Image (cartoon, helix red, strand yellow):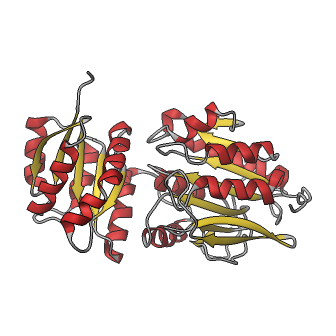
Amino acid sequence: MDRQTRVLVVDDSALMRQLLSALIASDPQFEVVGTAADPYAAWEKMARLRPDVLTLDVEMPRMDGLAFLEKLMRLRPLPVLMVSSLTERGCAVTLRALELGAVDFVTKPKLDVQRGTEAMAEQILEKLRATALARPRRSGAGRPGPTASPAGAPSTAPGLAGWRGTHTLLAIGASTGGTEAIRDVLTALPADAPGTVIVQHMPEHFTRSFAERLNQQCRMHVCEAHSGARVLPGHALIAPGNQHLEIRRSGAEFVAHLHSGEPVNRHRPAVDVLFHSVARHAGRNALGVLLTGMGADGADGLLAMRQAGAHTLAQDEASCVVFGMPKEAIARGAVAEVLPLERIAPALLQRGARRADAPPAAAK
């Protein structure tokens, strides 16, 4: 039998430490080697217990979760699953934790913590399994800052002759590790990049905070999608948590359509739902990108896009936090190019420039 994954639970709530420990220990893949009520106790126990993975509360006494995470990722990177509160401040702090190197997050139940945690059992274990597979990366604090230009400033990115046009559409899907991968791609795109639609597996409220954060960092205008929103050059629309995002044709334009249909691949929003709609309505006028993530969501949709004439790309294994979704798409023949994360935006610039002046595909 393979060695169990050793987990250290860090939370200032005794009840949460108890609930998470019992839940995690119920899965034979994991061994809970200890718990800690604050970062100082966690640091001491890490040296002694040698965990493989941490669950980490955001708000704790003596040292908050962000300060501890930044220190951890600088000195001793480990895969970390954040445990966050579903508040406006909790959303912002959690997104910062993902920037600093946390792999993913789960939200604490607001009411009846015990029943709520038990109801989320499979989601927590699934995210912990993905976290255990992830490649820890050092703190994002030392990474290059965003390259956003002031609103209305002309793009200075190279190689953009012929880029402007309303016909090309960019569709991006991601899951575990995707918030930072999407950030890296979008901040490298110019203000006149093709209209972009994005599905990132996230709950409600977090997608709005994610879009607002990206809007401050990117040359493009980034916002949460709403039904009827036009997909315009220089704009990126992010699917809201708990709603599927599709694109439809309205005359010569693409528009967003949201709905609360059944989860697909256990996700709502699902990448497959978006990609299949792009294949139907944009065809060869689309570019499709599948980034890091656990599972297979997006693989079938990306294949449909490629079969409809779209150019398709996937993030390579070495640069993925979790090489699940891209791996499945590659295995199904859905991917034309497999690239490291830092080469995806340049490839999109090159392909988008070629397609910008192409006539739109016929509506279906």
In the depicted view, which residue is nearer to us: 208 or 219?
208
Residue 12: tell me if it is visible. Answer: no
Q: Using the image, determine if residue 274 lies above or below residue 346.
A: below
Give the residue displayed 34% in from the left and 63% down from the top. Answer: 94
Determine whether, in the image, residue 95 is placed left or right of residue 31: right
Image quarter for residue 169?
bottom right
Residue at 65 percent of width and 62 percent of height: 197
* Res 32 → quadrant: top left
Residue lying at 57% horizontally and 59% vertically, measured from the top left: 199
Answer whether residue 209 is visible to the viewer in this image.
yes
Q: Residue furthest top?
A: 1
Q: Position of residue 22 (x, y in %)?
A: 16, 49
Figure quadrant of the C terminus:
bottom right
Quarter of the image containing the N terminus? Answer: top left
Which residue does the image show at 7% across and 44% down from the upper left?
Answer: 44
Query: Is 182 in front, or is 147?
Result: 182
